[in-house]
Image: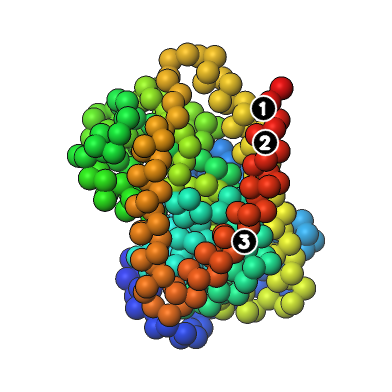
Amino acid sequence: MRRRDILAGAGSLAAGATLSFPAPAIAQGKRKLKMVTDWPEDMPGLHTSAVRLAQMIGAATGGRITIEVFPAGALVRPFETFDAVGAGVADMYHTDEYYFEKKSPGLNFFAAVPFGLTADELFAWVQYGGGQELWDALSGQFNVKSLLCLNTGCQMGGWFAREVNSPGDYKGLRYRMPGLGAEVLRRLGAIVVTLPGSEIVPALKSGAIDASEWACPWLDMALGLHKAAGYYYYPGFHEPGTATAVGINRGVWDSFDASDRRVIEAMAASEYARSLAEFNANNALWLRKLRDEGTVKILKFDDTLLKAFLEISKDVVAEIGTGDELSKKVYASYQQFRASIMDWSDIAERAFLNSRRLA
């Protein structure tokens, strides 16, 4: 059967259905798995983290589980990863699940939500606030077991060909952005598109788009965005702590014994913390390099814009909570945890960071 024929059938998985697929290659107790990603092979932080996670799992299992990592386009096309793993074409994926919000809008909560949870707060909700159990129910509908395995931290607001100073500047603006942030901009009048990372710089240079977000100084400069646009805005209201998931075909996951499942969970959690540290260290370094070059204007969004983003974001996020029963449960849990953790974050992290600037 051709790959596209298999993928075409993946979208028809019935909710709650249990499907059987051939187990990964097994030889004398060893497992060989295929992991597909939505990242170019030369993309630091993202593809490199997927490779590191695969290596860590291999080392922790004494080589009993080996994982071959495929960059975007090598085994399946970009954004086919979710369907490929659900259908058993691949065993695992490494991607941001908001790319697949059309499957279920609830997936956004496990990647990034405008004015939502930071990297540490998201990990706290998933690990200790009931998020993982809800995620299991949600991704289980698509024959997938998902785990957090990477976070970029708070992202930047994006690259622009010209300055933006008010909500009116977004009318007709051709902007590359995925997820719920894209819907916020649509309601401001922007024309929003989703492009793979490899297509962003050519689109900006040709004038096909006027602006784009990608991630943060480290990844943005690796992509060459600082050579394609002259204005770099912050903060990234749309992605306060963007998480990447490792998704595992449910049949493959269920075939592991309990000890191997715990190892994979532990390695994913370890890589989540390690990747966040790596992003913070490199973002600081590359932001300094960008400032020193002096060719790009680094600007904060005006407060009138941020307030407009916030008001629209409230409506966009709330609408997810009016959908199916599972999305309602995810939304309610997320919002309850957000209200609680904001109180603590304000008197802990925010108060300290503000006081550190007093000197």
Note whether residue 195 is visible. Answer: no
Q: Which residue is mark 2?
A: 353
Q: Secondary structure at mark 1?
A: loop
Q: Nearer the viewer, residue 155 or 358?
A: 358
Residue 179, percent from left and from top: 39, 54
Q: Residue furthest bottom?
A: 17
**Residue at screen point 56% across, 66% down:** 336
Residue 180, percent from left and from top: 38, 55
**Quadrant the C terminus occupies:** top right
- For the residue carrying disc 3, how many other residues have a C-alpha within 10 Å: few (<14), some (14-19), or many (20+)? few
The tag earlier along the polypeptide, 3 or 1, is 3
Q: Give the Cα distance between marks 3 and 1.
A: 26 Å
**Amino acid tagged 2:** Leu
Q: Secondary structure at mark 3?
A: helix
Q: Give the Cα distance between marks 2 and 1.
A: 7 Å
Residue 78, percent from left and from top: 40, 53
- For the residue carrying disc 2, how many other residues have a C-alpha within 10 Å: few (<14), some (14-19), or many (20+)? few
Note whether residue 221 is visible. Answer: yes
Q: How is the image coloured?
A: rainbow
**Amino acid tagged 3:** Ser
Side of 198 where 350 appears, left or right: right
Q: Nearer the viewer, residue 53 or 137?
A: 137
